Image (cartoon, rainbow, N blue to C red):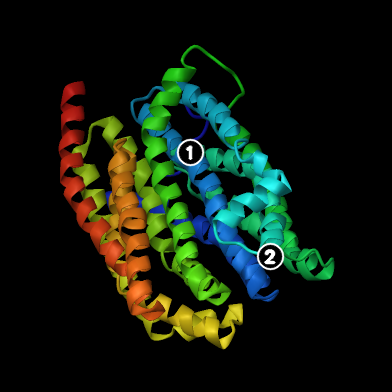
Amino acid sequence: MLKTKLQVDMGSETVGKALLKLAVPSVLSMFFHTLFHLMDTIFVSWLGEVSLAAMSLSFPLLFVIFAVANGMAVGTTTCVTKELGAKRTKEAQSFANTSFMLILFLSLLPFPLLSPELSDRFYSLLGAKDGVLSECYAYSSWMIIGAPLMGLALLWEALFRSQGDTFTPMASMLLGNLINIVLDPILIFGLKWGIAGASIATLIGRIISLIYLVNRLKQRTVIHPMLTLKSNFLQNSKDISIVGFPVALSQASMAIGSALMNKVLSIFGPAAISAWMLGNRIEMFAFLPVFGINSGLIPFLSYNIGKGDLQRVKEALKIAAKAAITLMLAIGLLIYTFPDFFLIPFAPTPQMASMAIDSIRASATGYVFAAVDITLWGLFQGSGYAYFGMISQITRTLLLRAPLAYIMGLYLGIKFLWWSQPLSALGSFLLSLLFAGKVLKLILKDINSKA
């Protein structure tokens, strides 16, 4: 039993009200999480095109690290919430222990890239040259050092969400982000640490966030992750990975897709890579409400699937999809109409701004398709059938976007290259829609088999 009442009663509270309570703090948490990267991007952009290009080239590696840790965290959310929905607190604790060891081990895997020689070889393959290589190492090395801390923070956030508390993760991100914002200009410009200062500021912010989460979890619940190896470790790891690995792979495919896009864009020079980076940062902010809804949807669906209430699952999915469509229609129209306004903080060069505007406007035409797609990923992850979302994501980023970008850029020019984004989003949406009907049937089958 939990020491305190769940922040949100996911089993009996009105579906719309429960989702709203889960989603709003999640949106704010996502906002502060994204603000980490946005503030770094703004300050680094003031250092010039070389530093910004280095950040863009470093981003795929850092996103893969995040994807692996977040995938395991999502798998933990699903497993823990299902156990809590079925009133099995001991088993929920066991999953938390397993995830602790799993995430800690996986977050150590990129440490070989702390070698400058290996780092230069790696980023050379991604298209980095000359001064960009040293900037890539300066930025990514501190992020790699901080990978275990980031992974554990994601685990602690997952445990709060699995118990209906999305407010505490939001508060931790707010705290860490405020520290990052204060330290960024001091370390980058005051101490003249350049791009490394941005990375160190983020690392310090994440350390403070993790300390806050650990202390709060001790006060609120009997579920405390511990470094312990028990006989059920392999089985628990398998259960977590069934959900987490497809999530990690689908998110990692986004990083690989970004790396491939950077490779294509390197043909057009650092300004094109930087323009793509700026467009991505703005898009990340645009989709915060949808990712927040998705983050609240996953534990809600898991809990009610564990409880055996398919009606609440379907109702939640409909509400989430309608909200995502409405929000992204409005946000997409705003960004398409005023892209120049959203680029002001980055102070781009005229060439970079022109490319970024083309990229932003092309991408905005596919926002609604992407919004529904992300909502359906919530269904796949919350139900434990995350591999369907993985297939859709890989189709979008690797099978459609990168090849389309190369072909359109090569034969039609860079102005048409950006349209690979909405076209690939449409393809992924159609595929996810097809999978959603199948998953709902599988959920019904699972519930009936346990009745």
Furthest-bottom residue in this view = 350
Q: Are marks 2 and 1 in contact (CB under 8 Å)?
A: no
In percent of the image, x 37 and y 39: which residue is there? 246
- Taking 209 as reference, is 2 left or right? left
Q: In which quarter of the image is the C terminus?
A: top left
Residue 312 vs residue 366, the one in the foreground: 366
Q: What element carries label 2?
A: loop
Report if residue 327 is visible in the image: no
| Rendered position, 223 above or below 320 | above
Residue 61 pos. (x, y %): 56, 51
Mark 2 against mark 1, which lies toward the viewer?
2
Mark 1 residue crowding within 10 angstroms, few (<14) / some (14–19) / many (20+): many
In percent of the image, x 32 and y 65: which residue is there? 404
Q: What element carries label 1?
A: helix
Residue 43 in which image quadrant:
bottom right
In percent of the image, x 33 and y 72: which residue is there? 408
Tell me the residue that label 1 is attached to: 73
Residue 150 pos. (x, y %): 61, 44
The three-letter code of the residue at mark 1 reads Ala
Count up the numbered dots.
2
Residue 371 in which image quadrant:
bottom left
In percent of the image, x 57 and y 16: which residue is there? 229
| Rendered position, 238 above or below 12 | above
The disc placed on residue 130 is 2
Residue 195 pos. (x, y %): 71, 64
Residue 369 pos. (x, y %): 27, 64
Dot 2 or dot 1: first in sequence order is 1
Rounded to the nearest angstrom, the CA distance separating label 2 from label 1 is 37 Å
- Taking 305 as reference, is 64 left or right? right
